[in-house]
Image (tube, rainbow, N blue to C red):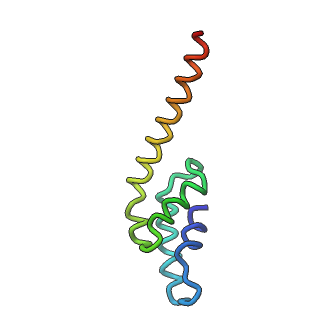
Amino acid sequence: MAHKLFCMVFKDKRKESDDKIVERLADDFARQVPELEFSSEEVLSLLLEHRHSRKDAEANIDAWVTRTREEKRKKLNREDSWVRDDESS
């Protein structure tokens, strides 16, 4: 999924000569995105954030993974606290 999204965002139909480069970068990108942990929407948001630089998209994966995991953890904690509050009443 990550590979296809990378190609969708960065392949330029007018420059077929770039296709091999984009495919290689997409392979590298997909290897760095943990499989089945993030939705396609989450991955796409990273790619669109860096849509002007495919190298930046790949270079920022580690920071994005860490940030996104932390956001999910905080959201889960908020939801859990609501459930705990409701159960204690």
Task: Pick whichever, 88 or 7, lies toward us.
Answer: 88
Task: Pick whichever, 25 or 48, lies toward us.
Answer: 48
Residue occupying the point 55% across, 61% down = 44
Residue occupying the point 55% across, 17% down = 85
Residue occupying the point 42% across, 73% down = 53
Q: Position of residue 62 (x, y in %)?
A: 39, 54
Position of 12 relative to 70 (above/below): below
Q: Position of residue 87 (x, y in %)?
A: 61, 14
Position of 86 relative to 35 (above/below): above
Q: Quadrant of the C terminus?
A: top right
Task: Pick whichever, 13 or 85, lies toward us.
Answer: 85
Q: Quadrant of the N terminus?
A: bottom right
**Direction top: furthest residue:** 89
Q: Position of residue 6 (x, y in %)?
A: 54, 69
Q: Where is residue 68 in the image (x, y as percent from the top left)?
A: 46, 47
Number of numbered callouts drawn: 0
